[in-house]
Image (cartoon, rainbow, N blue to C red):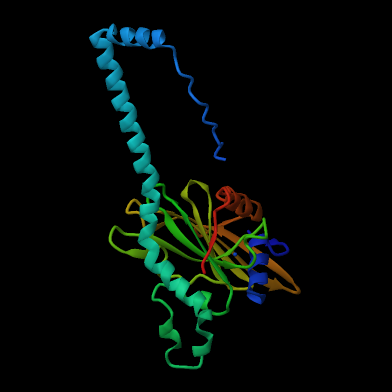
Amino acid sequence: MKIRKTAPSHIATAMILSAAFLLAGCGSNTPKETAPDVLEEETSNNESSVPENDREIEEENQNKDITNENDVADNQKAPSENMNIYNDVLTQYSDMVQNDFYVNLRDSDSYESSFGKDIGLEIRTHKQDIYYTFYDIDGNGTPELIIAGGENAVSNPTFSPWNYDLYGYDGTNVVHIFPEMEFGYRTNFSLYENGVIEVFYSNSAAESCVDFYKIGTDGFTPELIDSFAAVAHLEGDEPVFTYSQNGNEITEEEYNANIQSYEIALTALDWIRIQ
């Protein structure tokens, strides 16, 4: 089905992108009043009168409380320990930032080799603020590392960085979730609820594609779950778009509705500037 329309939102975005380039409450310690001697004696007598079975149950419950507290402490430590696996990658970005993106070496043979092996090509193209955050996309307990670029994240409450890379962990090494892709202004990704990763790209101003992935059970391999394309051609002076889902032609309304059904926004991520 061919429909004569103006450019859809995803195509329009591709056109724009191709022309331009992310108490605790303070408790008061109330002094404990000194109890009269007679009260202490009564308390002592009461404690000695507690049946042995009840005392064993009370001790058992106390032990359970201690165990639960230890479990909570271990769970609180786990995310921090898991994030340490990305220290080497973050060091590579920090070196790049501290060396002004190696601009002084741009005309030398050592320019390309100055960047860390895990740094993508497009993020190097111009000096900008670099940010990172962690998010457990697939909910397996190991957070993924997201790298982004942008300006004024702290002072701008609507800051939405431009994503440049996404890293996972294969149990031994840090890996790129999409090793065959270079993220930048023509190809990029967004994260949504329920573990959905949207990858959008355009081959030209007249063609854009949107693919949706989830991370596989191995914790790092992306698995395609849905694919959309919008292709335009001119008839006279007007663009005519053809829309498809997994290779099957659909209407513009179906195209927009089906894509939007995946785009359930996340709670704002906590971006940290790399220095």
Instruction: Work out which residue is located at the far right of the displayed protein and give it.
Output: 237
Would residue 13 appear left or right of 43 to someone viewing this image?
Answer: right
Q: Nearer the viewer, residue 33 or 146?
A: 33
Would residue 178 appear left or right of 254 to someone viewing this image?
Answer: left
- Which quadrant would residue 47 be assigned to in this image? top left
Q: For the point 68% across and 70% down, which residue is it?
A: 16
Q: Position of residue 51 (x, y in %)?
A: 26, 7
Would residue 112 appear left or right of 261 to someone viewing this image?
Answer: left
Q: Position of residue 87 (x, y in %)?
A: 39, 64
Instruction: Work out which residue is located at the far front of the displayed protein and give it.
Output: 37
Instruction: Please determine whether, in this image, residue 221 is positioned above or below residue 119.
Output: above
- Which quadrant would residue 1 be assigned to in this image? bottom right
Instruction: Please determine whether, in this image, residue 95 is positioned above or below residue 195.
Output: below
Q: Position of residue 254 (x, y in %)?
A: 62, 51
Q: Nearer the viewer, residue 244 or 85?
A: 85
Q: How many marks?
A: 0
Confirm whether residue 202 shows in the render.
no
Q: Nearer the viewer, residue 207 or 47?
A: 47
Instruction: Please determine whether, in this image, residue 207 is positioned above or below residue 68.
Output: below
Q: Position of residue 161 (x, y in %)?
A: 59, 63
Instruction: Please determine whether, in this image, residue 247 is positioned above or below residue 217.
Output: below
Confirm whether residue 49 shows in the render.
yes
